[in-house]
Amino acid sequence: MNNYEHSVYLDVQKCIGCTTCLRHCPTQAIRIKDGHAVINERRCIDCGECIKICPKKAKKAVCNKLQDMDGFKWKIALPAPTLYGQFENMDDVDYILDGLLKIGFDDVFEVSTAAELVSAYTRIYLKRKDIKKPVISSACPVVLRLICLRFPSLTDNIIPMLPPMEIAAMMARDKAKAEHPELSDEDIGVCFISPCPAKASYVKNGFGSYKSRVDKVISISDIYFQLINAMEHTDNIKSLSKSGMIGIGWASSGGEATALFNDAYLAADGIDNVNRVLDQIENDNIPPLEYIELNACTGGCVGGVLTMQNPFIAKAKLQTLRRYLPVSQNFIPKEQEGEVPADYFFSEMPTYYPISRLSASMSESMRMMSEIQTLRKELPGIDCGACGAPTCQAFAEDVVKGNANLSDCTIMYRSQLLEYLSSKDDTSDGK
Amino acid sequence: MSDLLTFHFDVDGDDFTSAGQASVQIKKNLRQLGIAPDTIRRVSIAMYEGEINMVIHAGGGEADVTVSETYIEIVLKDQGPGIANIEQAMQEGFSTAPDAIRSLGFGAGMGLPNMKRYTDYMNIESEVGVGTTITMRVNI
């Protein structure tokens, strides 16, 4: 956890230290120091909110480039279903998949194909008697990290099933090896075409002890123009797509949950809503539900910061695309209908990371919190951000932890200065 | 007293949607103190139920939380109508909440029983027409 490799970074040259990102960071991971933003890597959940909000475009996502695939003999693209909602006049997914082959991939394997199997196996999983309800989806990596940092009592509710991207990578590798027995594991490169930076972090860091089967992550926005130029709207392209309504539905909020054919679900999107729902689950203040689908981005994955299209327009486009598709095009083999295969599960689920803990010792933590409370009362309480912390409370915590100086509070500094000046006036008058 | 930490919250009786803010805040504080997740959850549920009760029945009130190294104490104090029959109020499913509140999903008669279930000690002092003070403790 301490060595977590993030995918959100700051272009120091562009950052003017304006404090906009400070206020929008849902985990208060950002401070302004020496005139520019600094991201606390232990707190960052890679949600991309700061990338969306930065007026100077100083916050960026680190992803791979298409050239990074050059080292592999057999290159496989794993397009997220969100990609399908990015184009005008799109009535057939095959144009997009064919375009991916034309820009250099040897094969494509749709994440939506794997998503249909994940949905089918989740329906089976939910019938188990030994699981904690409500079951929380494991698909959004931002939500997983948020739960580990802030909702320790809910880690057991996360479904231990691998997200569709991982299942797609596994299936794509198996397919490549079956069709081309001469290929070794190292020859095969699997590249996810991603709507968000969080997937890139997930691939780099794994999850618990699980190592991702995806090799590289390229953003939708990065390959968009190259792909659109390669796409041909002709009748004589190969039929490649094998996804139904369910698989493509995963791109927007509610799609994953409705695929469970079970009305006892909740689907929330947008990081603030996700936080509120998790708080209510922790307080036992929800109706009896089977499944909770949570997406950090507004609208679901279509709201990812690395997409090209407005999330609501992308959702509308996907609806058009889905209209004439069968419900699902992927089914689990008859002999496996009873249970979920072992390779669909994470090897280990992550546990609570107590990052907000003030000190390892309880009595020291209590002493520090008492000091924070006292200091907080002295501060102006207007959360102006000029000190570099998002709120006066956060500033008080920083000061007590030794990460900031009280003189950084400009309001306090000003009143102290005025007091000093007026006292000087008194003495100089000296009468 | 220097080894005790205290937190004070005013629970606003007019605003139903903001009920629960004190329990969200106390969760954050307890995480910072390094309290075990299960203990945090118990405190949070008990406090949340208490907050909701004060909003539904008493037009708001005050919540005071004291943290020591061995226990967390929550005192919820209101100047509401009081509880006529505490024994009856403690029964699961007993509720005097109006229909409008029930239609919001509250008032199922589980508030007080849940508060007792999730805490190690609970005491209710109430006088009709004067108000109610509930003291709960969760051992660490």
Image: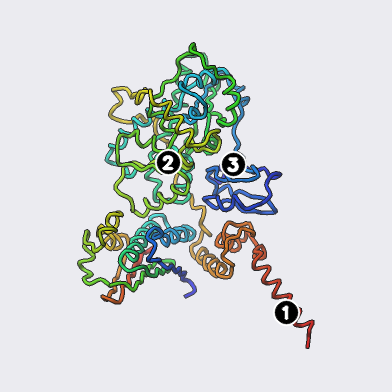
Q: Which residue is mark 2?
A: A349
- Choose the circle earlier in sequence order: 2 or 1: 2
Q: Secondary structure at mark 1?
A: helix
Left or right: residue A426 compared with residue A126: right
- Across and down, in percent, residue B59 comes to 35, 68
User: In the displayed structure, does residue B125 sit left or right of residue A422?
Assistant: left
Of residues A325 and A133, which is closer to you in this image? A325
Image quadrant where one finds the C terminus of chain A: bottom right
Name the image quarter holding residue A49.
Answer: top right
2 vs 1, front mark: 1
Task: Work out which residue is located at the far top of the displayed protein and give it.
Answer: A236
Residue B71 appears in the picture as rendered: no
Residue drawn at 41 percent across, 54 percent down: B37
Q: Are marks 2 and 1 in contact (CB under 8 Å)?
A: no
- Determine which of the numbered discs, if any, sits on residue A278 in the image: none
- Whether discs 3 and 1 lie on one chain: the answer is yes
Residue A375 falls in image quadrant: bottom right
> Is residue A250 visible in this depiction of the protein?
yes
Residue A201 image-quadrant placement:
top right
> Which label belongs to residue A423?
1
The Cα atoms of the two marked residues, 2 and 1, are separated by: 62 Å
Sequence order check, earlier mark of 3 and 1: 3
Q: Amino acid at mark 3?
A: Val
Q: Which residue is mark 3?
A: A8
